[in-house]
């Protein structure tokens, strides 16, 4: 379970008792991801950076090589490859949620350094941090939603295309908090 602003707690017994975060774990988890092919591996997008655990949260390691913007808001992992990771980040909470907003998308593959993504994406300036998702049954397919736009990548995050999505008239900027990817016929 992730709790915004102060904790990453876990329950070893389906919720009867809870344990506080470990000393090496993230302090401010915004989003936590678990991959079906690697169930002991946890991915944390946190205000204090990007973290991974490979032992169900007992120990954590930060992976920030190449990551220039370390206030991490969202993370998504390729359905077909638990080593293909996309994240959204900003320089600070202010740049993530307020004006002047400026957010960035990064990709990391198999332990390589983070690489900032640009191909097919709008300019980071003026954008709040994106909420990310991965298609559950189409390997290499990711989605990024922010402001008035949704973008999709079908090549593992290398390039992106804008989707024609119509938001409700009363939708407000920076209110997207979750993104669900659903298959339809």
Image (cartoon, rainbow, N blue to C red):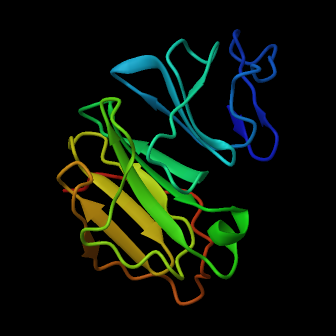
Screen quadrant of the C terminus: bottom left
Screen quadrant of the N terminus: top right
Q: Residue at x 47, y 64 (%)?
A: 104
Answer whether residue 43 is visible to the viewer in this image. yes
Above-or-below relation of 27 to 182: above
Q: Residue at x 35, y 30 (%)?
A: 111
Residue 17, quarter of picture: top right
| Number of marks present in the image shown | 0
Q: Residue at x 68, y 15 (%)?
A: 14
- For residue 142, side relative to residue 159 (left or right): right
- For residue 135, side relative to residue 133 (left or right): left
Residue 102, quarter of picture: bottom right
Above-or-below relation of 44 to 91: above
Residue 77, quarter of picture: top left
Q: Position of residue 29 (x, y in %)?
A: 67, 41
Answer whether residue 180 is visible to the viewer in this image. no
Foreground of the two, 88 or 140: 88
Q: Position of residue 116 (x, y in %)?
A: 37, 57
Above-or-below relation of 2 to 172: above
Q: Position of residue 25 (x, y in %)?
A: 69, 26
Q: Position of residue 60 (x, y in %)?
A: 61, 22
- For residue 132, side relative to residue 170 (left or right): left
Foreground of the two, 185 or 56: 56
Q: Residue at x 25, y 72 (%)?
A: 120
């Amino acid at each position: 379970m992730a709790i915004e602003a102060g904790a990453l707690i876990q329950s070893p017994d389906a919720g009867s008792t809870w344990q506080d975060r470990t000393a090496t774990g993230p302090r401010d988890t915004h989003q936590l991801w678990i991959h079906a092919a690697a169930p002991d591996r946890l991915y944390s997008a946190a205000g204090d950076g990007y973290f991974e655990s490979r032992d169900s949260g007992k120990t954590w390691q930060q992976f920030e090589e190449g990551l220039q913007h370390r206030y991490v808001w969202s993370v998504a992992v390729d359905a077909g490859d638990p080593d293909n990771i996309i994240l959204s980040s900003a320089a600070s909470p202010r740049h993530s949620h307020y004006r002047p907003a400026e957010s960035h998308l990064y990709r990391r593959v198999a332990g390589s350094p983070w690489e900032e993504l640009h191909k097919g994406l709008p300019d980071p300036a003026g954008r709040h941090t994106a909420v990310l998702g991965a298609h559950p049954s189409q390997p290499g397919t990711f989605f990024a939603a922010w402001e008035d736009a949704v973008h999709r990548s079908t090549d593992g995050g290398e390039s992106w295309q804008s989707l024609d999505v119509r938001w409700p008239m009363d939708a407000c900027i920076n209110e997207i908090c979750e993104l669900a990817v659903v298959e339809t016929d």
